[in-house]
Amino acid sequence: MAPTLIPLSRLPLATPALVREVSLSTAEAEWLRAIGVFAGQRVTVLRRAAFGGPLHLRTASGGELALDRGLAAAIRVERVIEREAEQQ
Amino acid sequence: MSADCHSSPRVPAPRKTGEEPSASREPTIVLVGRPNSGKSSLFNRVTGGEAHVGNFPGLTVDVLEASVELPELGRARLVDLPGLYTLEAPVDPDTDEGIARRFLDDIEREGGPLLVVQVADATRLALGLRLTAELVRRGLPLLVIATQDDLLRAEGRELDAPALSSALGVPVLRASARDPSTRERVLEAVSERLRTIETPARVRRDWDPDALARRVIHERDDIDARALRRRQLTARLDGVLLHPLLGPLLFVGIMAAIFSAVFLVADPVSSVLDRLVQLVGKGLTRLLGQNLLSSFLADGVLGGAGTVLAFLPQIVILTLAMELLEATGYLARGAFLVDRLLRIAGLGGRAFVPLMTAHACAVPAIAATRIMRDPRERLTTIAVLPLMTCSARIPVYGLLISTFFGERAAWIKALMFVGLYFTGITAGLVASLVVRRLAVKGRGLPLVLEMPAYRAPEAHVVARACIRAGWRFVRDVGTTILAASVVLWALLTIPPPGAPPASPGEPPRVAAVRRSVAAEIGRALEPVTSPLGFDWRINVGLIGSFGARELMVGTMGVIFGIEDAEDDATPLAQRVREARRPDGTRAYSPASGLALMAFFVFACQCMSTVAAIRRETRSWRWPAFVLGYTYSIAYLAALVTYQVAHKLGLG
């Protein structure tokens, strides 16, 4: 079964997911990689700011960042299956 | 603590082969690291505290430098670069990151003896190692210092430095900036590394940051409930401070609490200081008699500079609050909370830090805009920063509130104070909306901002910042404000040729002031300012405060000090309140006071700010624009305020 990809902006809270695609300009994608968000990284959305504000994201590398919701819509993630999530 | 420097058997290759290092040149040691890595704290610890600590990207605004004594090698130059995430992704050269990278390029081209010390936060090691990988790829001679070792241990974890060192092929030192012995250990490690810098060796590149970090960070055996709670500290604090409902409420509450504390806590102390200044003036006059010298000392020096000095407590309390917000990591939370709101104004969450910093002083805030990656948002932020209520406005607001609303309850006065702050913020947001619509159009870059872990502020760092701010204020009062007060005193004492005669029944001293050069100038402006409720005395104050707004208070102090024949210790506020026109009616009403406050909310009366804008934008257009629009709005706002207040019966 092919994995279902959803935009990071629509990922439910507290649900671990793997970043699969970053559909952004090279410059923007490279910048995101440097700060800790790139394909293959595991991320969790901790909360969303009110009125369409930024997401509060935690990465498996240990970083936390505020990420614009529009930007998050361009990042596609795959939910990590439950058993794997428990191990985290 | 057993945090030693572990030198790996493999030492990185020399930076440039075939080039002899000049023995005569001092080595340069460059501290690099991600923002929030604890780099500036470490720099502070090693240098004994010359630098400013930023727990938030961007507060290390300039490239800081210090001279250090290395064991056996002698003096070396230690440089603290602004934080940077990457050496490789494209970056705007005007940002902090761009500045840091330009510095690295330049120093490498210079070719002197060089050591790059990467400071990596041990509690977020994997992130730091991404930068290590880039530094290694670049072939820079490297030493890694894993900071926050004490915090890592408090979380029940431990870094295996020898393992990390051998995996990287680079020496690794564990350190914590809170530990006083860190200074010596860092200097020793640097010295050791510099001695072996020419030894050929191979740095390893075959590692993955995440996997390596997992491998070298161990769980400690003595892990207890406290350590586990400690790991959850940031998450639990965020649960409250970023709560969907509670978060924004707390945010506004914290801001209001700070601004009202500036008034409520500091005002009683200021009153005492003010009274003291007046008493000394009175004593001087008694001692010397009524003459030119006693007038110069009591009215010119004490009345001018002394009155401004009474506002020292406000400056210190505000600095304390700003430092605490910054050092705890709350500023990033503020950016997260207000990003959406700032987007409406055409800015973004990153603008929050400079906007907040500007409440202390616009000059460092302008430098702090270098954390903003979007050039349009950066320019807009610079243009609206002067509208934020900087600490130099506090003396003016303090004087005006106690003059015209002195009898009101303390909480009403505090509320007015907070109101003035929020008026400034609102004005800034509206101005930025207009600027973004008309002058610097285009979509801004979306927010990507690291949220650092909450940290307990280091008392000595915060205390040092407060002392520095207080000292700077005292120094300014002792130099520019004193000089301006003296000039003003002279202009108020010397009558111009052909001065009008004194009105019958007017006290001689009041008449003398009314006929002075300064009064002539002030009166010449009255046609323009009388619709605002300002008389010549306020006009003189406004001219005096063109360069620095707190001079308004000094000017008033000098004018009313000379005018007042009684030479008693009447507070300045009372003197202003009871000021009379030549015909004996009161010179000012609460309406004039409100209008003057409105003027000060908007006008960019600060030459240091103008110079900083010039420096940052490298053009005269922006400073001219800022002066033009702030003074226009200031005039209009004062006009509307006075006329409306007058109609409402406050005249």
Image (cartoon, helix red, strand yellow):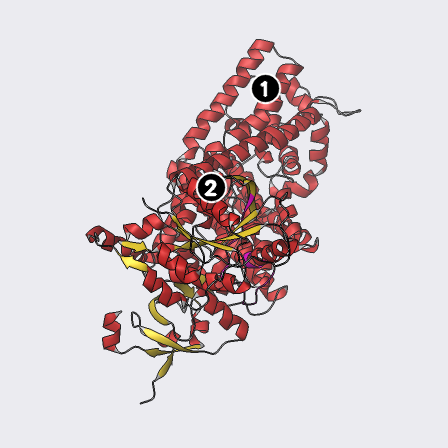
Q: Is residue B232 visible?
A: no
Q: Residue at position x 60%, y 34% from top?
A: B551
Amino acid type, label 1: Ala
Specify the subunit that label 1 lies on: B
- Whether discs 1 and 2 lie on one chain: the answer is yes
Alpha carbon separation for disc pair 1 and 2: 46 Å
Looking at the rendering, which quadrant does residue A20 occupy? bottom left
**Count of residue discs:** 2
Q: Position of residue B416 (x, y in %)?
A: 44, 43
Residue at disc 2, secondary structure: helix
Side (left or right) of A9 relative to B512: left
Residue at disc 1, secondary structure: helix
Relative vertical location of residue A53 with respect to residue B232 in this rendering, above or below: below
Q: Position of residue B89 (x, y in %)?
A: 54, 67
First along the sequence among labels 1 and 2: 2
Q: Is residue B23 visible?
A: yes
Comparing A52 with B9, the one in front is B9
Determine crowd level at label 2: few under 14, some 14-19, many 20+ residues with C-alpha closer than 10 A: many
Tag on residue B46? 2
Q: Position of residue B364 (x, y in %)?
A: 55, 47
Q: Which residues are magenta?
A: B77-98
Comparing B296 with B564, the one in front is B296
Amino acid type, label 2: Val
Tag on residue B298? 1
Relative vertical location of residue A88 with respect to residue B29 in this rendering, above or below: below
Inspect the magenta stretch and tell me whether residue B129 lies in it: no
Q: Which residue sits furthest bottom?
A: A1
Dominant SS of magenta comes to loop
Report the quarter where the C terminus of chain B lies: top right
Side (left or right) of B520 relative to B448: right
Q: Residue at position x 22%, y 53% from top?
A: B223
